[in-house]
């Protein structure tokens, strides 16, 4: 410990060699882990369905089974591609043949910026 010459009651320790390097490495590791968790959510979406924001989990309440398939209703702000600035609910009819199995057993839909339908994933057995 080093005693400060102007204040005999306070002792400080010199910084340990490599402390800042360890801090930087730890920070990078934590940020990498966080970003990989976010990326994992999109790992299973097929390339033709998702470019990073197009696909998102949706509430089961947004999906209704109708004759020949499903009617999906997305409120403004309920999907990254259908933000709060949208003024109307997006309604998409999805025929049964377009339903893909969802690996996590939840509902997901992929849409473009204008709300154009790309892909739809759901649990086996439907609604």
Image: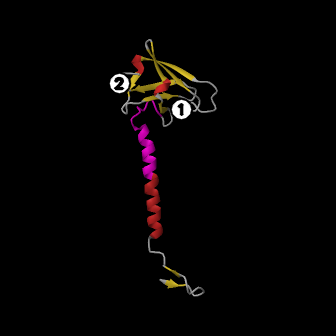
Query: How many numbered markers are drawn?
Result: 2
Residues in magenta, as a range: 32-50
Circle 1 residue: 79
Residue 116: x percent and y percent? 53, 24
| Residue for point 48% across, 75% down | 15
Position above or below: 13 against 40: below
In whole angstroms, how far apart are the C-alphas of marks 2 and 1? Answer: 22 Å
Category of crowding for the residue at label 2, using alpha-carbon neighbours closer than 10 angstroms: few (below 14), some (14–19), many (at least 20): few
Residue 12: x percent and y percent? 51, 80
Q: Nearer the viewer, residue 64 or 113?
A: 64
Circle 2 residue: 124
- Left or right: 46 in relation to 88: left
Q: Quadrant of residue 5?
A: bottom right
Name the N-terminal-most of marks 2 and 1: 1
Position above or below: 92 against 108: above
Whether tag 2 and tag 1 are in contact, CB under 8 A, the answer is: no
Confirm whether the magenta stretch covers residue 114: no
């Amino acid at each position: 410990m080093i005693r400060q010459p102007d204040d005999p009651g306070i002792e400080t320790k010199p910084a340990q060699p490599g402390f800042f390097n360890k801090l930087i490495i730890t920070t990078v590791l934590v940020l990498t882990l966080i970003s990989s968790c976010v990326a994992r959510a999109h790992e299973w979406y097929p390339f033709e369905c998702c470019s990073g924001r197009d696909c998102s989990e949706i509430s089961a309440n947004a999906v209704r089974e109708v004759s020949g398939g499903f009617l999906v209703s997305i409120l403004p702000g309920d999907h990254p591609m259908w933000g709060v600035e949208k003024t109307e609910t997006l309604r998409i009819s999805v025929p049964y043949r377009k339903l893909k199995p969802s690996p996590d057993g939840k509902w997901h839909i992929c849409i473009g910026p204008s709300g154009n339908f790309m892909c739809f994933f759901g649990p086996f057995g439907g609604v």
